[in-house]
Image (cartoon, helix red, strand yellow):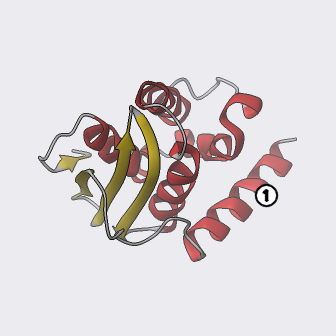
Amino acid sequence: MMDDVRELYQEVILDHSRRPRNYGEPLECNRCAHGENPLCGDKITVFLTIKDSVVEKAAFDGRGCAISIASASLMTEMMTGMTVEDARDLFSRFHELVAGDPAAEADWEELDKLAVLSGVRAFPVRVKCATLAWHTLNAALRDRADTVSTE
């Protein structure tokens, strides 16, 4: 089972880092936040279009390692169509997944493809890569203009 998870992890990370979904600055958005990981140089900007408390569109731009870009790509796919409240809840669940108890099992049904990122728990320095876009999303959901840092 662990080898299957590791293989899926590599497959999903490579796919989303090579062909990120929702990548690029949209022509219009009504929420935006910037984030950076000063230790490795990852920089992400998250763009949201929120109408009637629903994330109608989520996109990102920036540069970073494969994990950072893949996490942002997966995140934007999951966010589209969610309420702001559900998006904040998913942020909390994702953060617990990657930064929580290393022995905890990922809830594959609830987290879908995001569960593959549970593997970063074993590498604390990579947790910041996986969560950068998510912390930036959280700032955009709260309409905060300051730059988010993983430090």
Left or right relative to 94: residue 141: left
In the rendered image, the quadrant that contains the N terminus is top right
Position in image of residue 4 (x %, y %)? 85, 50
| Residue at x 24% of width, y 57% of height | 36
| Residue at x 36% of width, y 43% of height | 50
105 to 1, vertically: above or below: above
Q: Name the residue under label 1.
A: 7
Position in image of residue 26 (x %, y %)? 36, 68
Disc 1 residue crowd, few under 14, some 14–19, many 20+, Cα 10 Å: few
Q: Quadrant of residue 29?
A: bottom left
Count every numbered label the image shows and give the total. Answer: 1
Position in image of residue 138 (x %, y %)? 32, 37
Left or right relative to 142: residue 12: right
Position in image of residue 31 (x %, y %)? 26, 49
Q: Is residue 78 visible?
A: yes
| Residue at x 46% of width, y 33% of height | 87
Residue type at tag 1: Glu
| Residue at x 56% of width, y 66% of height | 21
In the rendered image, the quadrant that contains the C terminus is top left
Left or right relative to 93: residue 138: left
Name the residue at the left extreme. Answer: 146
